Amino acid sequence: MTLHARQWLDRIHALAPPGRVRVMNVCGGHERSITMAGLRSLLPANVELIPGPGCPVCVCPEEDLYDAIQLALTQPVTLVAFGDMLRVPVNAPRREPRSLEQARSRGADIRPIASPAQALALAVHQPDRPVVFFATGFETTTAPVAALLAQGIPDNLFILLTGRRTWPAVETLLTAGDVDLQGLIAPGHVATIMGPEEWTPAVERFDLPTAVAGFEPASLLAALYSVLRQQAEGRRFVDNCYAAVARPGGNPRARACLEQTMDVTAARWRGIGTIAASGFTPKGAWRRHDARVQLMGEDTPRRRIGEMPPGCDCARVVTGRIYPNECYLYGRACTPRTPVGPCMVSDEGACRIWWAGGVRTSRARRPARAPADS
């Protein structure tokens, strides 16, 4: 029997969990659905939904974005990227371009795209000019990049990849032990590619009730109910509440493409640091299409490399340590029109989502001392 969102809410309220229960929803798409549907306002007062590290734009390494800007400015290439990457700021002096959008205004050939297929089409259309695809994302967007490589791409198409694996980031957060959580809602799109089993370590290693959810309110509430019920009954398992799409073992073809073309490596996450086995990089013969190998020189030393902008608390937002409006800059210096940090740029960033949901002011006090800008 398929239950509607109202029925799942009734079940959640009837369960009446004692004490405070904090459940992390990992995915930016989940956060958008939760906020836009107003689900937090409908839950028992002691049940909290905590946004997690589910925004690939927010955790894209600052130094990779800086390199993309410099590559587009200094070499005769066309650089393409998903649209929300164009406004993400880097830690550059004010006299220099601080985003891909600003670099484009200075003459760099930078274009927004919506899919890897558009990067391929552009490379085919202009065979005499290098096209660099600055490819950000988690397993769900890295798999199509892997499929592109596996099927074969033109010699003039290069990939500047910042693909990331989701579970290692959550594992790092849980290992740190300073974020109080009683449950986990795992992203359905990642489970669709990798399989719900990807989240088994949350149960086996951290004793954390876990449920995979889709993006409709009913699926999210079903997952939350499962987590609360597991907590109440003392049971722990990965409950697949997105079974119509996320199947055991995931997507075999997508996983085969990832295995064929990508190595899993340690990777940097902006504001978080380096996380073991959390990144993808082209391997073997496909390195001839790796922009880092073929087009880029040595790293340029810079101040605050890899950090969030001064005063920005995006790193604590994406790791569930604070809510978006607990950053002092939120709604003050940082708005969607004038974003300071990446969480206010992307449609999957918790700050941008909360702003769109009507939260317009910060509840944080002024920091004792604001960091100096460069």
Image (tube, rainbow, N blue to C red):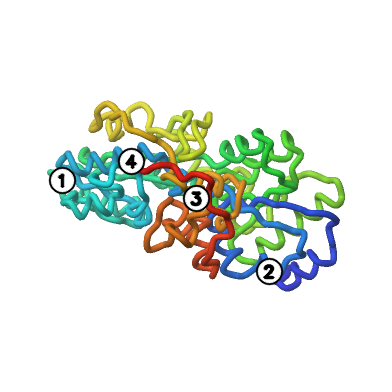
- Residue lying at the far left of the rendered structure: 128
Q: Nearer the viewer, mark 3 or mark 2?
A: 2
In contact (CB < 8 Å): disc 2 and disc 4? no
- Is residue 110 visible to the viewer in this orientation of the structure? yes
Disc number placed over residue 55 in the picture, else none: 3
Give SS at disc 2: helix
Q: Residue at x 67, y 65 (%)?
A: 40
Q: Position of residue 114 (x, y in %)?
A: 35, 57
Q: Give, as a three-letter code, the residue at label 3.
A: Cys
Secondary-structure class at tag 3? loop
The answer for how far apart the CA atoms under marks 3 and 4 are is: 26 Å
Pointer 4 residue: 374
- Against 203, residue 294 (above or below) is above
Taking the spot 43% from the left edge, 58% from the top edge, the residue there is: 334
In front of the other: 222 or 206: 206
Q: Residue at x 67, y 42 (%)?
A: 179
Q: Amino acid at mark 2?
A: Ser
Q: Residues within 10 Å of mark 1 (few under 14, many from 20)?
A: few
User: Where does residue 52 sit, x and y in percent of width and height?
Assistant: 59, 49
Q: How many angstroms separate mark 2 from mark 1 (CA)?
A: 53 Å
Q: CA distance from mark 2 to mark 4?
A: 41 Å
Residue bearing the label numbered 2: 41
Write down the quadrant of residue 145 in the picture.
top left
C-alpha separation, residue under disc 1 versus residue under disc 4? 40 Å
Which quadrant would residue 30 be assigned to in this image? bottom right
Give the mark toward the camera: 2 or 4. Answer: 4
Task: Locate residue 87, reporting x and y percent.
Answer: 34, 54
